[in-house]
Image: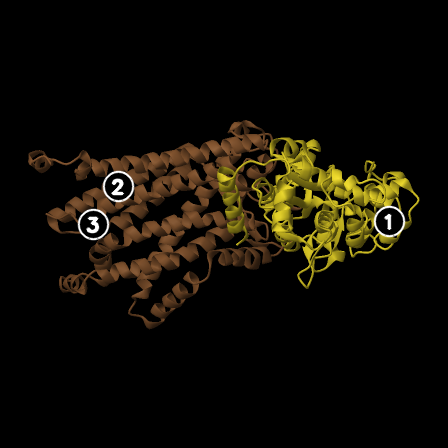
Chain colours: A yellow, B brown
Amino acid sequence: MKMVRSTLAVLTAAIALGVSSFAQAGATLDAVKKKGFVQCGISDGLPGFSYADGKGNYLGIDVDVCRAVAAAVFGDASKVKFSPLTAKERFTALQSGEVDVLSRNTTWTSSRDAAMGLNFTGVTYYDGQGFLVNKKLGVSSAKELDGATVCIQAGTTTELNLSDYFRANGMKYTPITYDTSDESAKSLEAGRCDVLTSDQSQLYAQRIKLASPDDYVVLPEVISKEPLGPAVRQGDEEWFDIVRWTLFAMVNAEELGVDSKNVEETAKTTKNPDVARLLGAEGDFGKDLKLPKDWAVQIVKQVGNYGEVFDRNVGAGSELKIERGLNALWNKGGLQYAPPVR
Amino acid sequence: MQTTANAPRSRGSVWTDPRVRAWAFQIIAVAAIVAFGWFLFHNTQVNLERRGIVSGFEFLGQSAGFGISQHLIDYSESDTYGRVFVIGLLNTLLVSVIGIILATILGFILGVARLSPNWLIRKLATVYIEVFRNIPPLLQIFFWYFAVMLSMPGPRQSLGLWDTFFINSRGLYMPSPSMAEGFWPFLIAVLLAIAGIVVVYRRAKAHQEATGERFPVLLTSIALLLVLPGASLLVFGTPFHWDVPQLAGFNFRGGWVVIPELVALMLALSIYTAAFIGETVRSGIQAVSHGQTEAAYSLGLRPGLTLRLVVVPQALRVIVPPLTSQYLNLTKNSSLAAGIGYPDMVSLFAGTVLNQTGQAIEVMAVTMSVYLAISISISILMNWYNKRIALVER
């Protein structure tokens, strides 16, 4: 009943926009504190980013961002509730106030930022769109895909990039558009389409969900820039800052060598002023954000620094084994860079 | 009006006059509804503006930039969202119209079979109806799509028929005709044959009513249809060139393709709705008193003719109103297409377009109005038909 649910979600959201009052700075934080948890929009099942394990616990980078926000606000990473959303439902759910943060491998684009009443707080994962094909096709480059049938997920930037890429290369294709990534994966296995296209990280994630992952290969071409990050409603700068600095705290912690194991010890003993400011031992930068003094300590202790989160969910410590690549720190050849706490 | 005008005026205030009161309450009710509607509209606009969400219908003129798997009119990625809307609408209408036709045919057969004197046919129809009307339509769509259509072999192992028709997991492939030199004479010959058949039918009917003698209309019609176009074929040459699908690269090229999403949706919707129509038809037929059948038999009409000339015309009066509801259900159920990626109104417009533009309120309003318009059109059409066949009492 996915589409029934999704239509309902959009409807209730539209009605909510009709009868609700408007967003105010500070309104989200107050509401979150009052209800006692952060409501977080995640995907409907994408290994490494947001998915439920066998016991019903949600795991993944996107999930950890939400847990980090809860850790910063409440000092307790478990005070978060998750709403799995399809690509189609996600923006309306955020616009209408159904979720407080949308952390759902969402690409940051100008129209989403400017026209949809959203603000992206940062980039949790630098991605790019790629192609997954069956080895039997004997295709080794995306340039050989003329005439192919391509499976995609509805309501994504992927749909637009795909069309741009094929038009730019003078090739033809037939798109088959599904609501969920599971349906497109099933359809690829059944041979309804030759190629599945999505962000590369998702392709690796979907590949391990296939019956025989070794029969499929990700083509080398990356056809787009996909900076993925959390988004919040426009008009509440206070909440925007909290979500933005939660991510910055995680990146800064990695850069400064603070991790979940040594954070409490470091907070007490550190001589490094940068670390001391981040962990609240010097100054009270949490107060500026309307957060407790030890906000960053709680984030790192309960969730981890950016490196740990990456490693555990998609990197060497996970099934996906994705290289850091663009997502390494800026001083290690990547793009992850956070402004200083001072 | 006449009576109240003549009635003696009440002496109390105007509020004791029931007529004034009734009007006043109705005016208040309408005003309240209008005010509430205006409040919703205004508040929504204010909210959208404060949250920085773009509103309005300018997006319909913007270029869409994504591909669509099935479009009945020409489409390329640089076309507008407005054109995408039309494509979604046509795709919804296509599946609804085909579904309604198939469901009606199948439903009438089932309804008659349910009352068949033959035990096996009767039980088979009962089992069919009980099975298909009790499974949710979405599951049936999934079954036809994932379990049947997608289990077909891949393009390179297609099941072929005489090397002209092919079926595989990508759809049904068939040759497509294009005009050849003999096209116009052929068309004229076919039209002439049809005109001839109409004339023969009318003459035969008049003749039968005047003299009681019957004329073999069917045989004459077939002969006309064969002879005239056949002659054109011999004299002017073939009317069509056939473009036969050929395996090229990943897929078949050329010919017509019916995508598996459409096939699955069409099958699921018509099979599901036919079960309900079957029951409607059965109840309609049973509503006609058995005395009518016995009277027809005693006049010497054969069972087939009795059904066609006596029972069905009377049963239709009972059948048509609930049949309208089934047509409406089928049309609305076609929005389940989103589940299997058939590019209908909901999947294309209320899905992709909504997401690319983020204008939920406008898109949902348009989509709902479209379904409302389609449903009301079906209702009007069926009500008109119902009036036509209604019992004319003298």
Tell me which chain the residue with mark 1 is part of. A
Q: Secondary structure at mark 3?
A: loop
What is the crowding at mark 1: few (fewer than 14 residues within 10 Å), some, or many (at least 20)? many
**Which residue bears the numbered disc 2?**
B198
- A221 or A279: nearer the viewer: A279
- Spot occupied by residue A335 in the image (x, y as percentages of width and height): 82, 38
Tell me the kind of residue under disc 3: Phe
Q: Quadrant location of residue B290?
A: bottom left
- Spot occupied by residue B198 in the image (x, y as percentages of width and height): 26, 41
Q: Do discs 2 and 1 share a chain?
A: no
**Which residue bears the numbered disc 1?**
A267
- What residue is shown at x 78% (from left), y 45% (from top)? A293
Tell me the kind of residue under disc 1: Ala
Cα distance between the residues tagged 3 and 1: 105 Å
Q: Secondary structure at mark 2?
A: helix
> Where does the C terminus of chain A fall, quadrant-wise?
top right
Is residue B219 rendered to the left or right of residue B244?
A: left
Q: Is residue B272 above or below residue A282?
A: below
- B356 or B329: nearer the viewer: B356
**Which residue bears the numbered disc 3?**
B215
Tell me the kind of residue under disc 2: Val
